[in-house]
Amino acid sequence: MARIKVPLSLLLVEMFIALTVVILFGLAYPDRFRSRLWENGGEEGWNSNPNKRIYFYANHQEPPEVPYIWQKRLTESNLGIAILTLVIFLARATLYYTDYLSRYISVIYDVVLLWLWSVSIANQSSGDLSDPKHPSPLPWYLTRSCSRAWEKNRGYCRIAQASFAVSILAAALYGARLLREALLVAYERGWKHGQVWSGQDADEEMGQEIGDKYMDDEHEAAEALMVPRESWQDQALSPVLAFFPSDR
């Protein structure tokens, strides 16, 4: 199982984001300011007005569905994602400290968190189209300055803006972690591939040297066994010539 080394700076950034999102979404739970921002936007004509929903009940009509941006489910899901992020950070830090952090486990963590924060960003930026006269493709506090909000709601407006911004940072962090791991894996595989080719080249060169040396030894042995032509001429061809050796 492949172990990985995580830079301390990356762990600190992840810890900061995990703690920040838990605090921000914890402040919004269960309905500290969601309904106030909805009412603020409705009275200013920036989105649907929750105070006018009572007229539907008075006329025995079914009111439009509450936009998801103003539902309690969004607050609960965001807080759940934030808590899960903190838990995964603590697990990752513990595994890293004990040298049991596997690359595959870390990648699974990053994929899950990237997906969750992407969903959270999409939900936080969802619109309010329940009132055709006052459609709002995006929450008003993401398209307007908080200075335009009611004075008692300006602080809540800034918290909502900060929550959205930190959610983007969280998604960017886990996306960057995945990209970093992909680049590291590509680099390591390329390096190993280069090492294999270098080893093969070295083996081929060594084999060539051994082959050349073997051929040289064979050639020298063959030359040593060969009888020179002149020695055949010097041999005595008859008993007579044996008594009259040639002068050289």
Image (cartoon, rainbow, N blue to C red):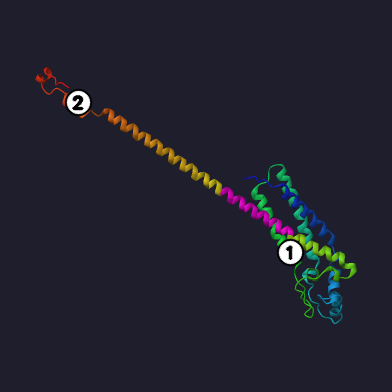
What residue occupies the far left of the structure in this picture?
Answer: 240
- Where residue 189 appears, as percent x and y from the top left, is 56, 49
What residue occupies the far bottom of the structure in this picture?
Answer: 59
What residue occupies the far top of the structure in this picture?
Answer: 243
Callout 1, which amino acid? Ile
Location of residue 100 (image quadrant): top right
- Where residue 36 appears, as percent x and y from the top left, is 86, 69
Q: Label 1 to label 2, Cα distance in Å?
A: 100 Å
Q: What quarter of the picture does the N terminus occupy?
A: top right
Q: Is residue 189 visible?
A: yes
What is the chief secondary structure element of the magenta stretch?
A: helix
Callout 2, which amino acid? Ser
The answer to whether 43 is drawn above or below residue 26 in the figure is below
- Where residue 71 appears, as percent x and y from the top left, is 80, 68
Between 128 and 64, the one nearer to me in the picture: 128
Q: Which mark is residue 121?
A: 1
Q: Is residue 184 left or right of residue 165?
A: left
Between 100 and 47, the one nearer to me in the picture: 47
The stretch of residues the image draws in magenta is: 169-189
Q: Is residue 29 visible?
A: no
Q: Would residue 44 be counted in the magenta stretch?
A: no
Q: Which mark is residue 231?
A: 2
Q: Would residue 188 be counted in the magenta stretch?
A: yes
- Determine whether the residue tagged by mark 1 lies in a helix, strand or loop: helix
Q: Are marks 1 and 2 in contact (CB under 8 Å)?
A: no
Q: What quarter of the picture does the C terminus occupy?
A: top left
Q: Which mark is residue 201?
A: none
In the image, which is nearer the foreground, mark 1 or mark 2? 2
Residue drawn at (74%, 66%) of the image: 123
